[in-house]
Amino acid sequence: MALLCHLNCLSPLAFITRRLSAPEFITQCCYHKKVVDHYENPRNVGTLDKSSKNVGTGLVGAPACGDVMKLQIEVDDMGKIVDARFKTFGCGSAIASSSLATEWVKGKSVAEALEIKNTDIAKELCLPPVKLHCSMLAEDAIKAALADYRLKQQDDQQEAVRASS
């Protein structure tokens, strides 16, 4: 298996010209270049003001592997997601899935963002079956952030009704 992975992922010249360290070998052999790109250059890392009524926060985790993902969205008055941020504790695939998810939700409506599926994330990042839980976490984080946003909007509407009564 390792030999097959070696043949598919690395140029034979890499072994002739220099020795690869263990992290370099794993990065070049076991992760697709899209995963490596999002891992080494993550997009939209950070946090938004969770107390803002226009910000939804989703916090999800996978006890089996220890990955924890926090994804936040900011929605404008027209229902369009204008910003997204994430913080993830986990493997390269979890970080890449979070990074890609934030890129994909920006500019979408709340309804459109709900249509993003883990299979789409996994396909885009070329995740192997053993890493599919990372894309599932990203989908769950999107749904949790959207649910939190909607809950805040309902609370805001209820307060407005109470104030007018």
Image: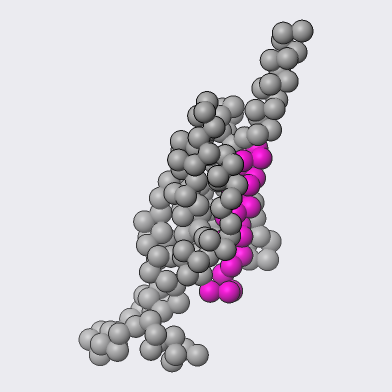
Determine whether 53 is above or below 141 in the image.
Answer: above
**Left or right of 13: which side holds 74?**
right
Query: Which quadrant of the figure contains the C terminus?
Result: top right
Q: Nearer the viewer, residue 108 or 145?
A: 108
Instruction: Tell me which segment is drawn in magenta.
Output: 128-148
Furthest-left residue in this view: 17
**Left or right side of 133 for 38:** left
User: Which x, y percent locates residue 115?
Assistant: 59, 50
Residue 134: say if magenta.
yes
Seen from the viewer's position, the closer of residues 80 and 8 is 80
Q: How is the image coloured?
A: one colour
The residue positioned 55% from the left and 45% from the top of the image is 112
Q: Main secondary structure of the magenta part?
A: helix
Q: Answer yes or no: is residue 49 visible.
A: no
Please name whichever residue, 45 or 128, is drawn nearer the observer in this view of the structure: 128
Q: Where residue 110 appears, x then y in whole percent?
A: 57, 39
